[in-house]
Image: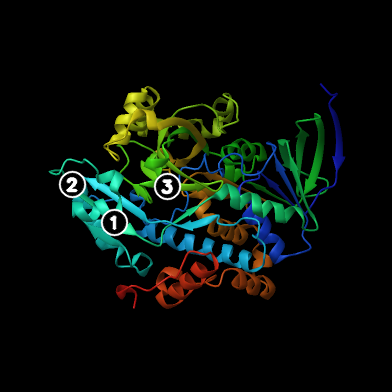
Amino acid sequence: MAKRSKSIQKGPDVVLIGAGIMSATLGVLLKELQPDITIDIYERLDSAAAESSDAWNNAGTGHSAFCELNYTPEQEDGTIDPSKAIKIAESFELSKQFWAFLIQRGFLNDAPNFIRSIPHMSFVWGKDNVSYLRKRYDALQQNYLFHGMRYSEDPAQLAEWMPLVMQDRDPSQPVAATRMDIGTDVNFGALTRAMFRRLYDMPGVHIHFAHDVRDLWRSKSLGGWKIRVENVTTNHVRDVQTQFIFIGAGGGSLRLLEKSDIPESRGFGGFPVSGQWLKCVNPEVIEQHQAKVYGKASVGAPPMSVPHLDTRMIDGKRELLFGPYAGFSTKFLKSGSYLDLPKSIQLSNMAPMLMAGLHNVSLTKYLIQQVMQSPEDRLNALREYYPDAKMEDWELEIAGQRVQVIKKDDEEGGVLEFGTEVVSAADGSIAALLGASPGASTAVSIMLDLLKRCFPDQLATDAWQQKLKEMIPSYGQVLANNPALGQELRKQTSEVLGLGVYEYTTSDK
């Protein structure tokens, strides 16, 4: 082993920790807004998008709330709350605008077909679930972002939409589905790697793979922050000075945020959830399914475990996955350490984590059941969506690791949050992204929120405002409340992204 050495190096304006879709998005936004800004990116693995952003590790690709039932909860009075679905659908439209801008700039020439059209469907069975889906459909139709969605309880119609799902299904079973033809499949691994390849060639940007950020602290003498980073190949350690840090390290973000010791970080904890897929290996079966079909999650299941029979394009090859099946590991990253969870426990978050555990006994029970599943159990779960599934047509694939956010709560003591959260210092000099779903699909919206928190003075300038509106034409407007603009932008982005011709439905006009 090489002898460990250490040096001190004056660093860039910005340090991005983690080479996933979040850091890629923020890096490109900052370079477009301020071309002379200098950025260093540190990734502990030897390539970009190797953890949460990778296609095989990502539970949802193209979250737009068209089919994900956990974004439209049923209230105690039986009504459906569509607010989260509307917010996510709008956020995904912002992402498409930004990607379209990058394509027009020639920025994504080496990421062909990272986004493709594919129908998004919700499928349920049983009287109560059919009633829920009908109410969900009616609630979503109040907003134009969901116009064009179709609803059916007709088994013959559903057999046309999703033949594998309906084949040999009990004809007496009440069933229902919705279909949204403008759904998409996004390979965030391919997109992320393409963005980093272009960033690599830009002046003032340096990307360091196989470099692990071990520590960070405020620099009292020079202001800003210092990070301690180790080259895991040579064991060389250096300290780097910077004025701003973004921690976009997936499950690894919590531990680094804790090291910052900013007051805003106190009370946050993490609950890791691992995942697995069943991957179809029979080309004849794969060819019979062309959709993302989402169902209802089991009681106590985390959102990343919403079951779906999912067509994807990965490395130019059509794939069919089912799952994910949840599990438990104390690792915070797929390539992490089993000590990640115990090392994250501190005095400031111990009580919230204990209280969140007490309030989520059903989740603990669900994860234990998932861990104990046999291959036959997994096949039986698949057969609820594909009745004719055969064991020999499927193999187990290990998915990614997610860390759900635990935070202090005045009433409950601690709550488990199923979403993403940006935690930033009061002075805006450091920010971290915690959580998982919907994550990658809403990266642009999340990073715009980060700019507002951490770069308020620059954001207020005419130059930044004009550039943001060039990159994201609906910037500064509530797109969900502006049908004319939203429909026009959907048409434009569909053309640029190669998603076909977007046509307004009757209800759109």
Of 464 and 315, nearer the camera is 315
Q: Residue at x 38, y 51 (%)?
A: 290
Under circle 3, the secondary element is strand
Nearest to N terminus: mark 3 or mark 1:
1
Looking at the picture, which amino acid does disc 1 mark? Thr
Query: Does the residue at mark 3 contact the one at mark 2 (Cβ under 8 Å)?
Result: no
Quadrant position of the N terminus in the picture: top right
Nearest to N terminus: mark 3 or mark 2:
2
Q: Which residue is mark 1?
A: 178
Of 184 and 156, nearer the camera is 156
Up-down relation of residue 258 to residue 156 (above or below):
above
Spatial separation of the CA atoms under disc 3 and disc 2: 28 Å
Under circle 2, the secondary element is helix
Nearest to N terminus: mark 1 or mark 2:
2
Looking at the picture, which amino acid does disc 2 mark? Asp
Q: Which residue is mark 2?
A: 128
Q: Residues within 10 Å of mark 1 (few under 14, many from 20)?
A: many
User: Residue 311 bears which disc, if any?
Assistant: 3
Q: Residue at x 56, y 32 (%)?
A: 334
Of 375 and 286, nearer the camera is 286
